[in-house]
Amino acid sequence: MNQVHRPIHRPIKAIRSFTVRGGKLTKGQQRALQELWPAYGLSLDELADERADFQQIFKRSAPTILDIGFGDGKALFEVAQKNPHQNFIGVEVHRPGIGHLMIQIHHYNLTNVKLFCADAIDVLNTMIRDQSLAKICLFFPDPWPKKKHHKRRIVQPPFIDLVANKLETDGIFHYATDWRDYADDAMGKLELSSALVNIAGRGNFSPGPQQRPETKFEKRGHRLGHGVWDIMMQKMNQSNPPCHHPG
């Protein structure tokens, strides 16, 4: 498991869009990280010389979904269990969440889930082949609520272009947040993309839990009276690559 924590060389001015949360590993989670990683884990180092071959990794050809920042993994586990005909790649840096999810997928013998313990930008840049993903999910990313920190939000033009490149034609980018300011900010940036179109219509949000599992975090938010906003963008059928937007 040690190899997944080897630092990745980044551009000097790269800005992290997340903070690594604390949290003590349970004995079960620690054991899962040590014993189950070879079965369910993917390493940037091991695949450094070539992009991930989904057919080889999953031993089949099937639509592949990338889940960025899956947290405790309960939502990803639920959707993977209900959709055995699809492949799922989860990306997370919170080790207790990774350990918890591996325990679940091992207990239920799910063979359609693989995990990265890494920065999602590194995974997208170095591991994912262009036009290879049926869907990319980004649920409740760090909102960086202070205005001076908005530059750290992951939904920025370079990220949007990267997402568009990795999605296959008609592929979906599904984003959700419980911060209305971040929802509006993301909507404005996403709708500038020449490669993506808002499924719900320009300026409109999409239904939430009908399209995805309701997370524990989301349920708690609803009890506290928080709103949740979903955006679903579809990659258009076009021969030209998406333009890079300044900013």
Image (cartoon, helix red, strand yellow):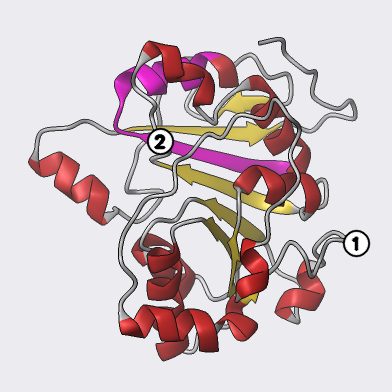
- Pinpoint residue 141: horizontal percent, then vertical percent: 43, 38
Q: Residue at x 43, y 86 (%)?
A: 31
Q: Residue at x 82, y 67 (%)?
A: 53
Amino acid carrying label 1: it is Asp
Distance CA(mark 2)–CA(mark 1) = 31 Å
- What residue range appears in magenta? 168-188
Q: Is residue 64 above or below residue 108?
A: above
**In the rendered view, does 209 fall on the left or right side of 131?**
left
Per the rendering, the mark at residue 177 is none
**In the rendered view, does 144 fall on the left or right side of 161?**
left
- Pinpoint residue 34: horizontal percent, then vertical percent: 52, 84
Instruction: Give the SS element for disc 1.
Output: loop
Q: Nearer the viewer, residue 68 or 95?
A: 95
Instruction: Give the SS element for disc 2.
Output: loop
Q: Quadrant of the C terminus?
A: top right
Number of callouts: 2
Kindly identify which residue carries mark 2.
142
Per the rendering, the mark at residue 49 is 1
- Pinpoint residue 208: horizontal percent, then vertical percent: 34, 41
